[in-house]
Image (tube, rainbow, N blue to C red):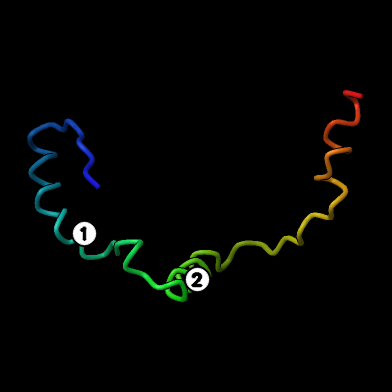
Amino acid sequence: MTVTIDLRPDVEVVGAIRAPRLEEKVPEPAALFAADRAALWRESAKGLPHTPPLSDEPISRESIYDTRG
């Protein structure tokens, strides 16, 4: 994917120096196996509070459209 951003020349120089290192750290999504993607997702979710799933009632069609008849 290509993204074009207009930058000041001094910022552009710094970006050109850092870009190759950044590309090495960001894997292509298609290159990751499902297990690798799952592991990355679990790692990114560490430390987040555990919240139980919603029951069917709060997200049912009847509860959403109850006042609209």
Eyeballing the image, is 10 above or below 15? Answer: above
The residue indicated by pointer 2 is: 38
Task: Write the residue at 21% across / 59% down.
Answer: 23
Give the side of residue 12 with respect to residue 28, left or right. left
The residue type indicated by label 2 comes to: Ala
Q: Quadrant of residue 6?
A: top left
Tell me the crowding category of disc 1: few under 14, some 14 to 19, or many 20 or more residues within 10 angstroms, Cα based.
few
Eyeballing the image, is 13 above or below 35? Answer: above
| Residue 31 screen position, x and y as percent | 31, 68
Q: Secondary structure at mark 2?
A: helix
The residue indicated by pointer 1 is: 23
Give the side of residue 44 with respect to residue 64, left or right. left
Tell me the crowding category of disc 2: few under 14, some 14 to 19, or many 20 or more residues within 10 angstroms, Cα based.
few
| Residue 41 screen position, x and y as percent | 50, 66
Q: Nearer the viewer, residue 52 or 8?
A: 52
Task: Write the residue at 16% across / 53% down.
Answer: 19
| Residue 16 screen position, x and y as percent | 10, 48
Image quadrant for the C terminus?
top right
The residue type indicated by label 1 comes to: Glu
